[in-house]
Image (spheres, rainbow, N blue to C red):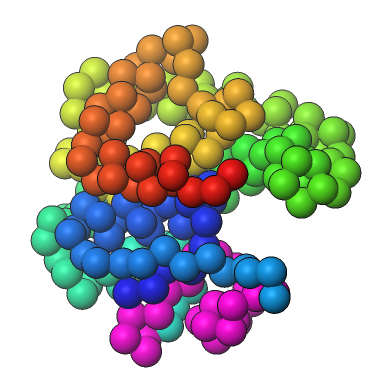
Amino acid sequence: MKLYGALLSPFVRKVALAAQEKGMDYTLVPFRTREGLDPGFVAASPFLKIPAIDDGGYTLADSTAIVSYLEARQPAPALIPAEAQLRGKVMWFDEFVDTIHCEAGLKILFHRLVGPKLLKVPGDETIAMQGEAAMPRIRDYLESVMPDDGWLVGDFTLADISVASILRTLTAVGFGPSDDYPKTQSWYERVRARPAWQAVAAIEDAAPK
């Protein structure tokens, strides 16, 4: 399976971690080269959003859609529970990350790091500050729901993958786990200890900067 994207993206990392947890083979493919956008990526992602996959000719974009596909294709180990209430809570955390945590955090990331340092375009500090203003409530919420041990929703699930993925991304701009949020910090260290996380992190750390 080809996975188009870059692991700095929490959405791409989410898919890579899900595949790694399930023991599914994938190849990370840059979606952009010096010549422009990869034609395979363009074909797989009609609106040019990462991540996208090509699994033997089957193409799909959007991280949640892709993880849902992987879950159906290889149900074990389950990352999305079958039981209704557990399933609902897992999808809540995934949506919380996609639409609330990322909305705030990626304003900071883009306007302080990706734009000025990677794309060489000016950032807008006003927008970055809007994202920063939303972070205390988000971080307080996560701290309030973190378990003393184990995982967010019973077994290790997509909920843990999604939340940990955005926290790793935001570490680059000072909004990852911290000692100010000890339960979140302890939970994050448990995620980081998982072999799948370590494998994906090694790929990310080895990528050209």
Residue 43 within the magenta-colored segment of the rendering: yes
Q: Quadrant of the N terminus?
A: bottom left
Q: Quadrant of residue 66?
A: bottom left
Farthest residue, direction bottom: 57
Q: How many marks?
A: 0
Q: In the depicted view, which residue is nearer to us: 206 or 110? A: 206
Q: Is residue 55 above or below residue 113?
A: below
Residue pictured at 75% horizontal, 35% vertical: 112
Q: In the depicted view, which residue is nearer to us: 137 or 128? A: 128
Q: In the depicted view, which residue is nearer to us: 102 or 7? A: 7
Q: Relative to 124, is 77 on the left or the right? A: left
Q: Is residue 33 above or below residue 15?
A: below
Q: Quadrant of residue 27?
A: bottom left
Q: Quadrant of the C terminus?
A: top right
Residue pictured at 76% horizontal, 51% vertical: 119
Q: Is residue 182 visible?
A: yes
Q: Is residue 169 above or below residue 30?
A: above
Residue pictured at 40% horizontal, 37% vertical: 164
Q: Relative to 6, is 86 on the left or the right? A: left
Q: Relative to 209, is 207 on the left or the right? A: left
Residue 110 within the magenta-colored segment of the rendering: no
Residue 84: x and y in percent read 22, 56
Residue 87: x and y in percent read 26, 54
Residue 149: x and y in percent read 20, 22
Q: In the depicted view, which residue is nearer to us: 64 or 83? A: 64
Boundaries of the magenta span: 36-58
Q: Relative to 39, is 58 on the left or the right? A: left
Q: Quadrant of residue 33?
A: bottom right
